[in-house]
Amino acid sequence: MSADKKLSPPSRELALALTFATKLARDRESRVSLRDLLGGMYLSSLDRLRRYWDEWERLEDFVVSECDLPRPRFMYLHEMDQYLRSDREDLLTNFDEEVSQIMSEANHLALKSG
């Protein structure tokens, strides 16, 4: 990356999705995977995801099943609210290889587009 091009910080929505993904991965004692990212997007911004599916209930069923989210969504939201209000550790995490590649390619494309 050249010195004149810097990555901008993620949007609030993306930052919250990544925070949820990190929490889901930590709960499984694992690195952040694609299923965690999808679960994080679902938990943090279902309203945004719904726009892309005619039958959003099927999307919700799919995500809950594939991402192993057995509790109602509001419970995860409440848990995250409590976590963010507490004195917490830093949210740095390791991403698995597949997610690292996707993030790297996304950064590369963002830099190319200006």
Image: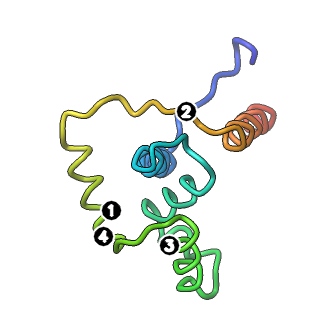
Crowd around label 3: few <14 · some 14–19 · many ≥20 (10 Å): some
- The label nearer to you, 4 versus 3, is 3
Check disc 2 and report the residue beneath it: 94
Earlier-in-chain disc, 4 versus 3: 3
State yes or no: discs 1 and 2 in contact (Cβ < 8 Å).
Answer: no
How much space separates mark 1 and mark 3, taking CA atoms? Answer: 12 Å
Earlier-in-chain disc, 4 versus 2: 4
Q: Quadrant of residue 62?
A: bottom right
The amino acid type, in three-letter code, at marker 3 is Val
State yes or no: discs 4 and 1 in contact (Cβ < 8 Å).
Answer: yes
Q: Which residue is painted at 26% across and 44% down in the image?
A: 84
How much space separates mark 2 and mark 3, taking CA atoms? Answer: 23 Å
Q: Which residue is painted at 81% across and 33% down in the image?
A: 112
The amino acid type, in three-letter code, at marker 1 is Tyr
Q: Which residue is painted at 70% across and 11% down in the image?
A: 3
The amino acid type, in three-letter code, at marker 2 is Asn
Camera-nearest residue between 1 and 91 = 91
State yes or no: discs 2 and 3 in contact (Cβ < 8 Å).
Answer: no
The amino acid type, in three-letter code, at marker 4 is Phe
Check disc 1 and report the residue beneath it: 76
Q: Which residue is painted at 70% across and 21% down in the image?
A: 5
Q: Position of residue 103 (x, y in %)?
A: 68, 39
